[in-house]
Image (spheres, rainbow, N blue to C red):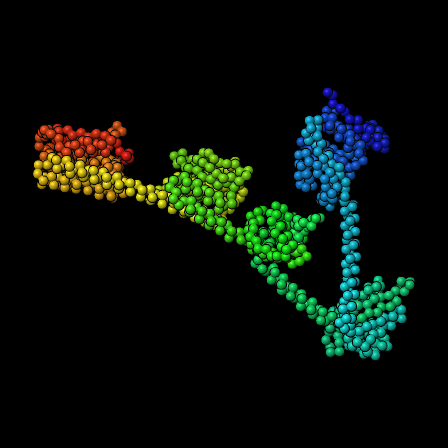
Amino acid sequence: MAQAVCDWERFRPLSDRMTARAFSGAEQDPGKVLPMADQISHHDWSGTPLGSHRRWPQSLHTIVDMMLASGHAICLAWGPEQTFLYNNAYAPFLGARHPQALGRPFAEVWPDVWAEIEPLVTRVYGGETVTFQAMPLIMTRNGYAEDTWWDFSYSPIRDETGEVAGLLNIAADATPRIVAERERDAATEKLRVSESVARANFERVQLALGAGAIIGTWFWDIVADRFTIDEPFARAFGLDPALGREGISLAQIVETVHPDDQVGLADAIKKAVARGGHYAHQYRVRRSDGNYYWLEANGRVDRAPDGTPKMFSGVLIDIAERLAAEDALARSEATWRTVFETLREGFILGEVIRDASGQVVDWRYEAVNNAWHDMLGMPRGTAVGRTVRDLLPDIEDEWINEFARVVETSEPARFTRRVGTLDRWYDGVAQSIGDDRFTVIFVDVTDRIKRERRQATLLTLADELRGRSDLQTIVTAAARCLADGLEVDRVGSGTVNLRQDTIDVQSDWCEQGVPSVVGRHAFSSYGSYLADLRRGDIVAVDDIYEDARTSGRQREFDAIQTRSFLDLPISFDGRLYAVVFAHSRTLHPWTDGERQFVEQVSDRVRVALARQRMEDAQRVLTQEMSHRMKNTLAMVQAIATQTLRQAHTMDEAREAISSRLSALARAQDILTRTNFTEADVREVVEAAIAPHRLAGERVAMSGPRADLSAQQALGLSLAIHELATNAAKYGALSNETGRVDMTWGMADGAFKFHWIETGGPLVIVPKRRGFGSKLIERIVASYFDGEGHIEFDPAGICFTLTGSLVQPVNALKT
């Protein structure tokens, strides 16, 4: 479908069309400002986002037609770039920016007021209509700043698709109206003040008459220039009363006035005579006692029909007592003002504001003291005359509702409440003083509230950790405690992989709009503070842009919306297992109170982990002792039964049982020194062979350190005892030349122990195997989940034990 083309010629006034034709030839004046229909028609639109006007959509042609035809001031902004067009009536509003404003982006046309109108433009492009009356704007459209006021309506313009494509502004300059209203209000106020002064003067005279404070009268016949006074007047000025009755010059009166007040008095009289009407002036006069006293003269200048001054009469009022009272009041007010301003508590004098229905919707500050400014962090002079919603737009409704209840019920109210936008807590008392006004005295209790809340979370943490034994539960409880005790945007925890220097975050708590960081992260991506965590140090970074440990990692932190963070390491036996973290997306310097709180959380976690370890050890010890006792009793029973069965005499049986039980006891001693859980092979071997090492260097041993279970230690000890006893009786240790070598180690993934005898008597294979052989080959081997084998080599007995260990063999001890 062909694009519609607008004929803007028909929208120009006749005079405009004549002007356009007059300048349409070669003689056209390039400096001439054409009507807007011509401006739009001749404008080079190809260089703008709109492109050639012949290709404009029908919706744009239609709205431009309407705009140019209207006698109202209208402008429009079209497209995402908000290209600016306007009509003749709007052009004067642009000042020196016309006609260059045509085709420019809206923001470039009005840069001086864009901060104020840009939010409105955004709302209109969102489909909303915005209307304002007398909106104040400071414009520099003519090269200087000027105060202006505007009535306007912003409406969305939709294109053929139904989407908002532009903005239509119908505007009216309200500046003349507002200026006129202000001038009228100023004149009214001036008249009110003048009437108030006259009324106050009249009231003072009436009070003076009632109180007997009038001390004299005067009458000045201005035409005859005759000045007469009564006797009290004369005495007040220290003059001869006779002179007053006969007439006295004004100069004589002025001579008794204090030198500092004479010029002012003469000027006041001169002005009163010149303008006529009421006269009032205060000055000091010298009386007969030589002292000066304050008086107030109140009178009136009457005029003749031709307007010339005719007479000037009045009274003298003694104002010494009144001035003394006013001075005392001023001093009292100054004293109280000093007290008011030096109060450490914040003070508010406020008045509630009601809507048309009488509902309290806001309140206004009438007075605040210095402590108020300090506690709210507001500059001096920013509160008085403003409303609380104006000063703190996001203030909680309860700050208005509670003071409304105080005013309406006349009952004082005690409060402890938070101002969210300030992140501060206040405790105070509000009282009504009548006429919708109230006072508030308050203190900042933010530190106390946060301290109490953190203490409560620490108590909760202690309850949660009590009876907990698994590490993950302890870590989760610590993270929850930080979330409750710190005002941050994200709290979570993760386990640490020290081989890969990574942290796996299992869970986190995030404020709305803050992304979760659940998943695996490399410590190196966020800085160089892992070493601090390994040492068990809490890492507190106030600002990732400034801290050397996070230098160059701003992009990574920006990606997770973090500006400040705190990491709490969870370590066990000197090894870093997990980290609990707290993140703030805005700058958050960590306070001493917050750092101390995290330290306290860390202390409680360490205690919980230590208790867990102790309880685990106690539980294992109890189980081990029970198991050990059963095994030991079974072993003793087996030793006794088998020994008695094979012994030839009771003495032989007693000696064999005693020897075997001694070996068992020595093995138990080793286990006792190692907490009943494990023992080193070397210790077991040395303890078992010790009674038989009388042969000196004829007994040798070698092998790496290896930890045996309790059962394995007992079994190996008994095996060595049996072998050593047999060697001392019949084998390598029964003569002066024999030798025993014991070796152990790992081979092909299995633990092997060798007992080799050399240099002893010729070995003869026994006709039958006794309990000792059974003990060594079967019972002891079963403790290693392996096998034992005795070889009766003629050159010497050899015993080999093959099995597995509970713990792997460590490096050979040197």
Q: Residue furthest right?
A: 306
Most foreground residue, 391 or 566: 391
Write the residue at 72% across / 35% down: 155
Quarter of the figure with residue 316: bottom right
Quarter of the figure with residue 371: bottom right
Q: Which residue lies furthest to the top in this view?
A: 1
As drawn, is 761 to the left or to the right of 362? left
Q: Where is residue 472 in the image (x, y as percent from the top left)?
A: 41, 39
User: Residue 97, can we see it?
Assistant: no
Q: Where is residue 502 in the image (x, y as percent from the top left)?
A: 42, 35
Quarter of the figure with residue 151: top right
As drawn, is 321 to the left or to the right of 685? right
As drawn, is 28 to the left or to the right of 436? right
Most foreground residue, 347 or 267: 347
Most foreground residue, 480 or 593: 480
Write the residue at 13% across / 30% down: 769
Q: Where is residue 330 in the image (x, y as percent from the top left)?
A: 67, 65
Write the residue at 77% across / 34% down: 87
Q: Which part of the image, by quadrant, shows the N terminus?
A: top right
19 lies above or below 448: above
Q: Position of residue 133 (x, y in %)?
A: 74, 43
User: Residue 55, can we see it?
Assistant: yes
As drawn, is 62 to the left or to the right of 700? right
378 lies above or below 199: above
Q: Which part of the image, by quadrant, shows the C terminus?
A: top left
Write the residue at 73% across / 77% down: 290
Most foreground residue, 204 or 250: 204
